Image (cartoon, rainbow, N blue to C red):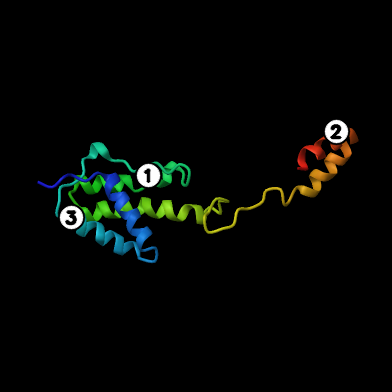
């Protein structure tokens, strides 16, 4: 008897496929999930989880496919399971780009000081006594 895959195993398989074929379609990944796991046993609903991606996507997004996966397990439909996995995978891949987050890997890191440097200089000149400014300058210089 084949070993039961976990939902995490299936999600990791989908992630690995996307890494190895980044230009492949989500439909290709779904069909590969069905062809790899479809002849075996269904995952246990007790292990209905995928790795946490809170550092990339809000929880309600990275877990968004799990209800569809659960329904697929209950209905014994590998197509539904694959569809649920793809919903979560799409969120993990697309949320950083769509949300315009600064840690999106496709962008250069944004310098937060760029827009405030002039204002900060004026405030420091106005409110910082010259002797404290000199101490601060010495701390900055090597």
Tag on residue 100?
A: none
Residue 25 screen position, x and y as percent = 35, 65
First of labels 3, 2 by sequence position: 3
Residue 94: image quadrant is bottom left
Say what secondary structure mark 1 lies in.
Answer: loop
The residue to which callout 1 is attached is 63
- Which of disc 3 and disc 1 is earlier in sequence? 3
Residues under labels 1 and 3: Cα distance?
Answer: 22 Å
Seen at 23% across and 39% down, the residue is 45
In the depicted structure, whether residue 134 falls above or below residue 57: above
Q: Nearer the viewer, mark 1 or mark 2?
A: 2
Q: Residue at x 29, y 55 (%)?
A: 83
The residue carrying pointer 3 sits among few (fewer than 14), some (14 to 19) or many (20 or more) residues within 10 Å by Cα, namely some
Q: Are marks 1 and 3 in contact (CB under 8 Å)?
A: no
Q: How much space separates mark 1 and mark 2, taking CA atoms?
A: 51 Å
Q: What is the total number of numbered labels drawn onto the structure image?
A: 3
Front tag of 3 and 2:
2
Q: Which residue is mark 2?
A: 132
- Position of 18 compared to 5: left or right? right
Residue 38 tag number: 3
Local SS, label 2:
helix
Label 1 crowd (10 A; few <14 / some 14-19 / many >=20)? many
């Amino acid at each position: 008897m084949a070993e039961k895959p976990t939902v995490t195993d299936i999600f990791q398989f989908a992630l690995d496929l996307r890494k190895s074929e980044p230009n492949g379609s989500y439909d290709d990944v779904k069909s590969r999930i069905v062809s790899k796991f479809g002849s075996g046993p269904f995952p246990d609903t007790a292990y209905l989880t995928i790795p946490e991606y809170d550092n990339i996507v809000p929880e309600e997004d990275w877990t968004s496919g799990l209800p569809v996966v659960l329904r697929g397990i209950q209905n014994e439909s590998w197509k539904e399971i694959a569809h649920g996995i793809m919903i979560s995978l799409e969120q993990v891949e697309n949320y950083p780009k769509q949300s315009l987050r600064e840690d999106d890997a496709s962008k250069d890191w944004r310098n937060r000081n760029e827009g405030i440097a002039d204002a900060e200089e004026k405030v420091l000149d106005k409110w910082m006594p010259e002797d404290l400014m000199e101490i601060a300058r010495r701390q900055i210089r090597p």
